[in-house]
Amino acid sequence: MKRTKRPFLLKLSSLTLCAALLLTGCGGGGASAGSGSGNQTASGAGGKKTLTFWHIWGSGDSNSTAVAKVIADYETLHPDVKIEVQTFENDAYKTTIRTNVSGDTAPDIYSAWGGGFSKPFVDAGKVLKLDDYLTNEDRDKLVSGALKNFTYDGGVYGLTFGMSCSGLFCNSELFEKYGVPLPKTWEELISAIDTFKASGVIPISTSIKERWVIGMLFEAIALKEAGADQMYATLTKNGGSFSDPAYLDAAKKLMQLEEMGAFNSDAAAISRDEAEVPVKQGQAAMYYMGSWASGSVDAEDSVDAGKFKFIPFPTISGAKGLPTEFNGGGADGILVNAATADPALAADFVKYFTENLSREDYQAGNYLPTYKDAQVDESKISPTTLDIVDATKDASDFVLWWDTLLEGSDVTTYQDALDLMIQKQLTPEQFVEELKKIQP
């Protein structure tokens, strides 16, 4: 598994890793598990071929409409096929799918994340290798790097439909009102925070309650301290080390933000969705989040819709990270159960689903596409989504978020330690000592 390196622009020929414009989307209505069992799939009622499909984009999720449309379109084109869908809430699903894959009760097809999340499934022989089902034409449709995070030991085990990256969503209305320049450096960020705080504006709205949210912010600082190469080598246990001073420096900077009051006062008590409320109400100047938030900040219920600027996290003087390096990549994907009764049909659906969802999601402002020829009406695309395309057009590298790139219990070790540091039960030095437990 190699890190994705490529330009990420929506010049469909050179688009590259950043955009699952809603990474890791939140799931919809939870369904019970245990009834997928891909090796039981055959013909359904009326002689139709049936494929079971589990995913996290249920009712209420920003991706649900696009997903439902693509599934319905496939069934229309293939009247002899029925796709039986179950949807799950995001966090609960991570446990559910791990349990069902290991217990051989997974569905024929299921959504998952690349990198370290799916690697144990592949290592255990539970995922269908797709190489035999991907023609040269299929591969040529994809943007450079689209297969990287689902490639293990040279084989492709999943397809992704969108790219995502994280950055600062800045309310340009507030920046102009208080005469604050968009921050390009750490010093400018600190100055902006001081100005907004003194003016009664929330500098950065976030959620500490949902660990992945505050984790994204720490990882942004760490990327700018360590640089993409060093971070990737550390997270994949391929020559990097948490002993590198960059990680301690990043931890200290995160705590500097917390101690200076950069965050909303209720950050420890509210969810990501709740943290987005003051952003949309014009009460917060900045919001560090994945590119998937673009549709939300530009929605009709956002008082400053169309006035947000997406910028990379500021660079740090003397550090290794570049302004063209982002956290993110093609992390959301679709896998096929190795035990499915009809692997050719399942692979055909996954190819259709990912290619067409790539287009639908870009049009809806949910993700940036992984397919070159995503023909959409750009006049109807969220202004902030187009801004993200521009901000990432010269991207040189992308590193997946830690809770995706790290494997299994390593994620828990990291997030537990981050929790304790934010609660001031661990010092930055002690936090880094906990991270060293992740080392091989």
Image (cartoon, rainbow, N blue to C red):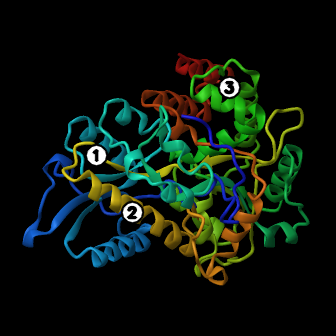
Q: Which residue is mark 3?
A: 428
Can you tell which mark lies on residue 386? none
Q: Which residue is mark 1?
A: 337
Regarding residue 254, the answer to whether it shows in the image is no
Against 328, is 69 above or below? below
> Which mark's residue is nearer the viewer, 2 or 1?
1
Circle 2/circle 1 CB separation < 8 Å: no
What kind of residue is marked 3? Pro
Q: Nearer the viewer, residue 297 or 351?
A: 351
> Which mark's residue is nearer the viewer, 2 or 3?
2
Q: Residue at x 89, y 32 (%)?
A: 318
What kind of residue is marked 1? Asn
Q: Nearer the viewer, residue 16 or 58?
A: 16
> Does residue 205 appear to the left or right of 79 in the view shown?
right
Few, some or many C-alpha atoms within 10 Å of disc 3 (few <14, some 14-19, many ≥20)? Answer: many
Task: Name the spot of residue 81 as percent of width and height, x first.
Answer: 22, 69
Regarding residue 198, the answer to whether it shows in the image is yes
Q: Which residue is mark 2?
A: 57
Few, some or many C-alpha atoms within 10 Å of disc 2 (few <14, some 14-19, many ≥20)? Answer: many
Q: CA distance from mark 2 to mark 1?
A: 19 Å
Task: Name the spot of residue 224 as percent of width and height, x first.
Answer: 77, 39
Q: Nearer the viewer, residue 292 or 176?
A: 292
